[in-house]
Image: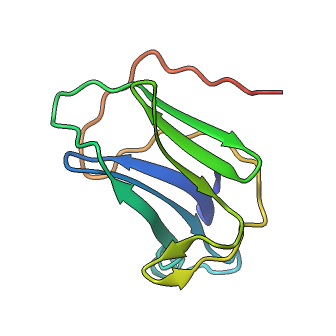
Amino acid sequence: RHVDKYRHWYFILGRDKVEMGKKDAPTNITNQAEIEKYQYTLWTGPPATPIGTRRKCMMEFIGNKFSLYLDDKLIHTLVDDGNLVSNGVKIKQSDWTTGEFCMYNEGCQGRYENISIEVLP
C-alpha cells in the first residue's frame, strides 16, 4: 500500500529472512534523511529465499490489516491498530488506509513476472 514517499507499507524478500514494515512520516518534512527515520521494521522472520529461488508473493490489505503470503502460505499478518512495536517503541496507527501498488528493488537485481493486482469489494 503505497501512498507517497512519506507513507507506505512494505515487505522485503531477503536471502536470509522476510521483513515487513511501514514508513509513516509527517508530510511537511522535506529532508529525505529525516523522512527515512520514520521507516519502521515491524516483523522479521522466515523463510529464507536463496538467490535464484522463485517465489509467489501475495500481499493482502483489508482495512488496517496487512497479510503476506509466500507460495500460498500465510507468513505473517500485521494489524495497524496503534499497538505495533518497532525496536521497543509503539508505532502510532496510520491515518491512511488506501494506496497504490509499487514494485521496488534497492541495491540488487530483481525479476518479476505474471503480476496481477486484484481489488476486492
What percent of the width, then of the height, locates residue 67?
57, 43
User: 28 above or below 40?
Assistant: below
110 left or right, relative to 80: left
What percent of the width, then of the height, locates residue 7?
63, 62
Instruction: Name the residue located 60 percent from the left edge and 78 percent from the top edge.
Output: 30
One can see residue 1 in this view? no
User: 116 above or below 20?
Assistant: above
Instruction: Name the residue located 45 percent from the left edge and 49 percent from the top edge.
Output: 11
Q: Give residue 28's quadrant in the image.
A: bottom right
Residue furthest left in the image? 51
What percent of the width, then of the height, locates residue 74?
48, 36
Instruction: Name the residue located 29 percent from the left edge and 34 percent from the top edge.
Output: 110
Q: Give residue 15's quadrant in the image.
A: top left
Q: Give residue 41's quadrant in the image.
A: bottom left
One can see residue 93 in this view? yes
Location of the C terminus (image quadrant)? top right
Q: Which colour assignment does the render follow? A: rainbow
Q: How many marks?
A: 0
- Judge by depth and name the residue closer to the eye, 102 or 65: 65
User: 23 above or below 56?
Assistant: below
- Judge by depth and name the residue closer to the eye, 12 or 83: 83
